Amino acid sequence: MRTRTRRTLTAGALAAVLVAALSPLWIHRDETPVAAPPAPPVPAPRDEQAAMAEAASTGTDVLVETATTQTSQTWALPTGKLRTDITAVPARAKNASGQWAPIDITLAGSGGVVRPANAPAPVRFAEGGTSGTESVLAEAEVGEHTITYTWPGPLPKAVLDGPRALYPEVLPGADLLLVAREEGGFANLLIVKTPEAAKQAAVRTVTYGLRSTTAVFKSDKVTGGVQVLDKAGKEITAIPTPFGWDSAGTDPELPPGAAARTSVATSADVLRLSGLSGIEPGAKSAQLPVKLDGDNTGNATLRLDAGATGLLTGKDVRFPVFLDPTMNTATLAWTLVSKQHPNSNFNNGTNFNNGTSEARVGHEDETGMTARSFWRMGFDAAIKGATIESATFKVLNVHSWSCTTREFQLAWTGPISTATTWNKQPTWNTSPGANKRNFAHGRDACKDDYASFDAKAFAQQAANAGANNLTMGMRATSEGDTQTWRKFTAKSASLSAVYNRPPANPSALASTPGGSCSTAGITVARTNLVLNATASDPDGNLKTVYFRFWKSGSTMPTAGTPHTALSSGKASVTIASTTLVDKTVYLWDAYAEDSNSTPAKSPNFATPGTPCKVTIDASGPPAPEVTSVDFPEATDDGATWATKPFGQAGTVTFTSQGAARFTYAFEGVTEVSKTSANAVTVTDLKPPHAGPINMTVKAYDSVGNPSQPTVYSFYVPPRPEADGPGDVTGDGRADLLVIDGGGNLRSYPGGMTGEVDSSLAAGYRNGTELNPAGHWTDSSGKAALIAKFGDAYPGDGITDVFARTPDGKFWLYPGDGYGSFDVDDRISVMLPSGTPAPSTWTQIKAVGDVTGDGRPDLFVRSGTAFWTLTGYTGASFAEAVQMETTGWDRREIVNVADIDLDGTPDLLFRHLDTGIMSIRHGKPGTIAKSVDLASLKSAAASRQGDVQYGTGWSEAAITAVVSIPDQNGDAIPDMWVRRASDGQVRVYYPSKVNTNGEVKIVLPVNVSTFKALA
């Protein structure tokens, strides 16, 4: 089994985009890997069903462990409802053991790298103590991308303090501070300690390198920040608007009137600076002009023109001065907008350098700042359609201008993005209207406390829409009042919603008699008609299924007849035969309702707009109902298979009131009759092949009136033995593989004598996505070349498919044994030197092993020549042999097999223009049952030249020929043939010397649109 491993940068790869001396922080040439001790077994996480059962039995809220994410936890409640608690900022991350643990951004260094203990996304800082002209400063992983920051010089040894790493005197009189952030990413701050330090050119223009092998950096002319884009131009993260500020602001951690902390005598003093809390009232601040060298590349230089702001030279400036930018991760959790800086972006907060970010709302007079804040909560789209019983948004208020309360509004808004600024705010929705609250917390006289808002209406809007996110914004009602200034701990913002989900639309609609619901219509006898449906409720509180039944052409009822569902979810209603009129059409459907205090109904009737249709006909028995535990009826998702593998007999029961006899036939071949009144059980039912099967069942009354046929479809799993030649479903019989007119790969299981009837989708991904694009046809309609014979790789006995895809590449698609192929498991096939490019191929033919080396061989047409590729190893073919150089642009290889039963493979081919089928008899190879390839290179080299084998095989008359193993027991290979006249497929049983005529039509539908057959 092959697995894919995410690529990480090597030292050599990174050196190509940085400088030769730089290496990623997490590669250490002196490290010796140490095997981790085996982890103790961890109990399987509790799923929703188990949590709901435990909550009901214990009367307590129980965590649904399988639903936990970085920002949400879901709890099963004893009432049968669920509660989901959502935070905007990640509250947990998976630790090294793969278990959820609280976010811990405490830094620790090892082997030259500093890491947070358990960050929401990986970040790495340099441990320092390096020399050179450029140093890797930090790295952040954003999805599949690694963003690297570099510093233009050596880095001193880092001083660690909780989430902070301080690099003292990175420039004379200037320290560099990195801060791991709870939101993810990191803050990056140059602390200019003195006016003398501010005079340096490296301070007046602060420079950082930005590097990535998978992303590019693009300056944002509106916000002054930097966008980080993937190679397709999609934004993956951003560097918000950089700012600088001085130390004149109020320190919120000190008593009113206390002097700000500005000492820089020691690193400990620097880490206590008041200005590290960000731009506070009274501080002088300015947006830093940005220049990005290498714009729109993955190798850029960020230059911050601090000298242009006046912050370094102003006479009233108070040192130290602080110059950032911040590096966000891909998680956009919250933002604030500032009227004072109308085009600046503050995603996930910026200018916060103590590890905890603060949202800000309201107005303060000292600097004239007016702010609003927004939080984006990751809403579960699976809650779509749920009834929100209650929802509360709350956030911790840690600072107010005073303890005087003021009114604030929480509203449902449009989404936030890296382009969100005061001038480009999300829409403040007016319906539902804002929720308003008066509060003031975060002072000595009014301690820190949560501000809570009723968010039920907002959450209901998100549930109605099936939204993935719910964004809410907060603003002061009176934004010119300095008493409205508030700060909130950003990570504390949470939304807690209690909800009841509606039942699912009923499924498995069926009538007795009649069987599964048909919107096209089924005919049943005039007997008591039982309508059946199965419903389910994700919260486990299903109560009732309502059935609607009415005569076609009459008024459709708006409500149905209620019937209490069984614990299994099944419900039924009986329509008395005395109420049914002969030769009349009736319609019916169903919906479900739960037991909530305000009952929730399923979103639609089970068949919205297209009800089930039954016609009453008293002239014959009703169409048989087919039931079987061994061979359950196939479901639309293809997930229901028989419990009996191919080759084993099982039991099936046919039921039809008034019937005296039943018949059944597979694929319309060899009808079997069973005489029995009303019902019959067949105990020795043996399907003719594996894979999808259609069984047609009819009932007859005592005078011979037939019922309407019931076509019962089911899937038969493969036998445990290895696949036979040409077999993909595991029954040892050759199957037909096609690329249909829609460009989809499909498998048609073959029957005992070459019949093909039903099919299944043969390409898939992730077990659910059928026939993903890009494998079998391209946008122009060009189809792949496909060929199969047997197991080629990985030696599991399952037939695999060789494919030259429309883009000209050559692959092996391993089979899954059930007639289909996971396209994500495909293997690129390496070719020997001298092989013509796959893009030039016009045909490939898999023939098994004809050279005697025990490995698969493949015959290929390219231009006017044909080739043999021998000895496939599971990775490559051993040798490419050019067989003949001319004439093969208008010939087609039909088979390379022992046609005349002399023990040596022969070459069978047709002339596409003349229609002559020829056989070129091979000479024996050195190994028994092998062929000397040289004898197939030309007529002269063969045993007796090219011998005519048949006529009338031109491309104009015959659009496809597929050679298959013997079907009629004479050991001579047979053929499936598609005629141009009607597009139908026949089976031929050739002899040793002639193709013979067609035997029968085995696929009686026009498949002329099929692009390839194998």
Image: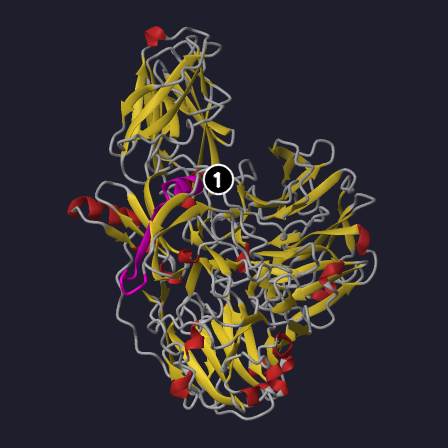
Residue that badge 1 annotates: 430
The residue located at (43%, 23%) in the rendering is: 663
Asked whether 676 falls inside the magenta stretch, the response is no
Residue lying at the far left of the rendered structure = 58
Q: Which of 52 and 331 is in front in this view?
A: 331
Q: Where is residue 717 in the image (x, y as percent from the top left)?
A: 42, 45
- Judged from the image, the secondary structure of the residue bearing numbered disc 1 is loop
Q: In which quarter of the image is residue 850?
A: bottom right
Name the side, left or right, on which 645 lies relative to 881: left
Taking the image as drawn, is residue 714 in sight?
yes
Q: In which quarter of the image is residue 105?
A: bottom left
Q: Where is residue 245 in the image (x, y as percent from the top left)?
A: 52, 74
Q: For the residue marked with disc 1, what is the amino acid? A: Thr
Note whether 210 is above or below 542 in the view shown.
below
Q: Position of residue 697 (x, y in %)?
A: 44, 25
The residue located at (74%, 35%) in the rendering is: 980
Magenta-drawn segment: 442-462
Q: Which of 972 and 604 is in front in this view?
A: 604
Q: In which quarter of the image is residue 504?
A: top left
